[in-house]
Amino acid sequence: MPQKQPPRRQSISVGRGARKRDEDSGTDVGEGADEWAQSKATVRPPDQLELTDAELKEEFTRILTANNPHAPQNIVRYSFKEGTYKLIGVVNQLAVHFSQVGNLIPKDSDEGRRQHYRDELVAAAISYQGSQESAKVVISETEILEEEEEPKEAEAEPEAASQTDVLAAEAAAKVTEEELLTPKQPKERKLTNQFNFSERASQTLNNPLRDRECQMEPPPRTNFSATANQWEIYDAYVEELEKQEKTKEKEKAKTPVAKKMGKMTMRKMTSMESQSDDITKVTQAAKIVERMVNQNTYDDVAQDFKYYEDAADEYRDQEGTLLPLWKFQNDKAKRLAVTALCWNPKYNDLFAVGHGSYDFLKQGRGLLLLYSMKNPSFPEFSFSSESGIMCLDMHADHPYLVVVGHYDGNVAIYNLKKPHSQPSFRSSAKSGKHTDPVWQVRWQKDDMDNNLNFFSVSSDGRIVSWTLLKSELVHTDVIKLKAEGIATDGPAGLQLHTAGCGTAFDFHKEIDYLFLVGTEEGKIYKCSKSYSSKFLDTYDAHNMAVDAVSWNPYHTKVFMSCSSDWTVKIWDHTIKTPMFIYDLNSAVGDVAWAPYSSTVFAAVTTNGKTHVFDLSINKYEAICNQPVVARKKNKITHVQFNPIHPIIIVGDDRGHVICLKLSPNLRKMPKEKKGQEVQKGPAVEIAKLDKLLNLVREVKTKT
């Protein structure tokens, strides 16, 4: 703010009075001035060092750094990477001397405006009070000066004194009027720093960054997916019913007092719990209704299965066709190949399907499904496994027992009477599981102690007999395959034999101890259960792996084999050369004899075709070559004849199973002659096949 005039007058008047007082007192002002003009004397402390000029001129350079002198320099920490304690090279040099939490208020905010307005009001009040006090001081000073200068004149001339008083009053009044009339201009001030905030920046050394990595095992993960069908709902109701029965049994065992208390609590329960539906009472009816609904949906297919016969076969000389009926597929079996097929020996409409993968680079879960032709929409039973299922077989006397072989070398037994997801029996590393995939399993007759047993063959060269005891599987190595003609010299002149890789086997229908084994080398070994070290005979059958071996259901000397070398061969086990050889122009995945004729068999190839042969009609080529898959890329993997009905089922590498009906030309029976009965039975079938084999034997003996 600009300085006011009254204070200036005050300083002048005060100076006059002081000068007058000095003159009256007669003091000398120059003496005080001389004292201040004198030079100041330096005061030295008594303990100060006396240094020479050279020492005083010497310069000592001090370099200021940002390092903390009190920071520790010997900190060590344990290094998990190297397994030792190591010295830390970088230490934090930051030293905090003072810290205070504060905040800043922007000028444009509401709080900033309020503080600014409050400070202006305080400054205006202070300036107004100061102006009033300065006016009073001017009036009093003028009165004092007049009294001191002319005391005598004031007594002699009272009129002059009164005039001076009037002039002084008028001057003070003018000053106050000017101050009041002039507008007050508040002084612009900065906001006071209420929190003593100060901002300082400095550049310090940045700690170097370090990348630390550690390796650990990933946590286990599982992919879970599930679908609800009628049977799972049924299982849930059964479990609920069992819980209710257990609670009823507990209530019966309670004391009378506890029963009364239980009745009181039961009365408080809702009526919904007491009226829960018991699905076990309508289980059989629900199954029948479900199958009736499906038969209505697939009524045309059911009619074709029962009654349709291809009339065009009468105009075909030696050819037949396959009529597609049902197609069985499940969402769980997507992207899984059909690795095994087997009909139930007791229920002719029920069959089991094993799902896995033949690609060793894409191995994953497995699935066991059981379908019925009465309900093609949903499987009757479903079992999942961690490893792919490569083979299966159903027991002839106990049709509810299903044995499966897995890709990881394990074997397991599922009990259909106990529809749980886990198998009833399962092998392990301790119980002698295979080290390679199990390619085939077969149930055998009960042993001497009436224990169930089955055989398995694997790529590790072992043929193992498994016996079911009360709670475990007991294994016995029957024979270990060795690749003949392949031996390497080991140390000390020892010969190391290469183990053979078994891929398929089949047991004789009448001779219990006799069985055949096919290998990856293309050889077929005739073995006996009694001899574990030697083979009864060896057949140089194929140039590639043997995919299937099967004895003829009627003729005891004849068996059939197929391979990836595109051929199907029919053998007499007493002769080392094949009787018939058929080239199908593609890798053959499976073969199967027909149960109604000794000369009819079917083969499936990877190009999606099914071939049906009848040696009594045509010895040289198939009487039916028909593609049965929807896409050309799909490969057929397995085929099986139904034991009663004239149908076959084929499975492909997409998880689909197709049911096909044989036309009349594919199941021709001997024609009835006038006055003669048609002879039927195993003897007729054996004679029919022997007739064909004798022709081939005669040709071979001549050559």
Image (cartoon, rainbow, N blue to C red):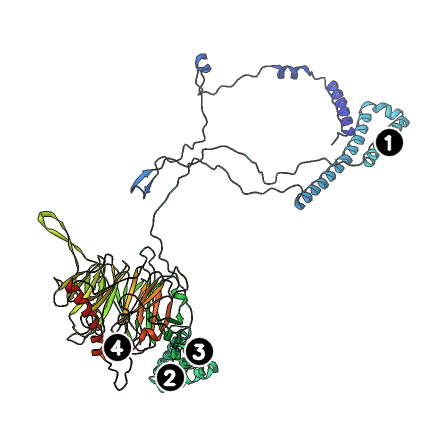
Q: Is residue 485 left or right of residue 668?
A: left
Label 4 – label 2 distance at C-alpha: 47 Å
Q: Is residue 527 left or right of residue 161?
A: left
Q: Amino acid at mark 3?
A: Asp
Secondary structure category for the residue under label 3: helix
Question: In this figure, which residue is indicated by the disc labeled 3?
Answer: 299
Question: Who comes first in sequence, dot 2 or dot 1?
Answer: 1
Residue 44 versus residue 380 in the image, above or below: above
Question: Who comes first in sequence, dot 2 or dot 3?
Answer: 2
Question: In this figure, which residue is indicated by the disc labeled 1?
Answer: 170
Label 1 – label 3 distance at C-alpha: 131 Å
Q: Amino acid at mark 4?
A: His
Q: Are marks 2 and 3 in contact (CB under 8 Å)?
A: no
Secondary structure category for the residue under label 4: loop
Using the image as rendered, state which of residue 518 and residue 586 is in the foreground: 586
Label 2 – label 1 distance at C-alpha: 116 Å
Per the rendering, the mark at residue 258 is 2
Q: Are marks 2 and 1 in contact (CB under 8 Å)?
A: no
Quadrant of res 583 = bottom left
Crowd around label 2: few <14 · some 14–19 · many ≥20 (10 Å) = few
Label 4 – label 1 distance at C-alpha: 138 Å
Secondary structure category for the residue under label 2: helix
Question: Who comes first in sequence, dot 4 or dot 3?
Answer: 3
Of circles 4 and 1, the one toward us is: 4
Per the rendering, the mark at residue 398 is 4
Question: Does the image show residue 478?
Answer: no
Quadrant of res 197 = top right
Q: Is residue 112 left or right of residue 527?
A: right
Using the image as rendered, state which of residue 479 and residue 168 is in the foreground: 479
Q: Are marks 1 and 3 in contact (CB under 8 Å)?
A: no
Question: Does the image show residue 247?
Answer: yes
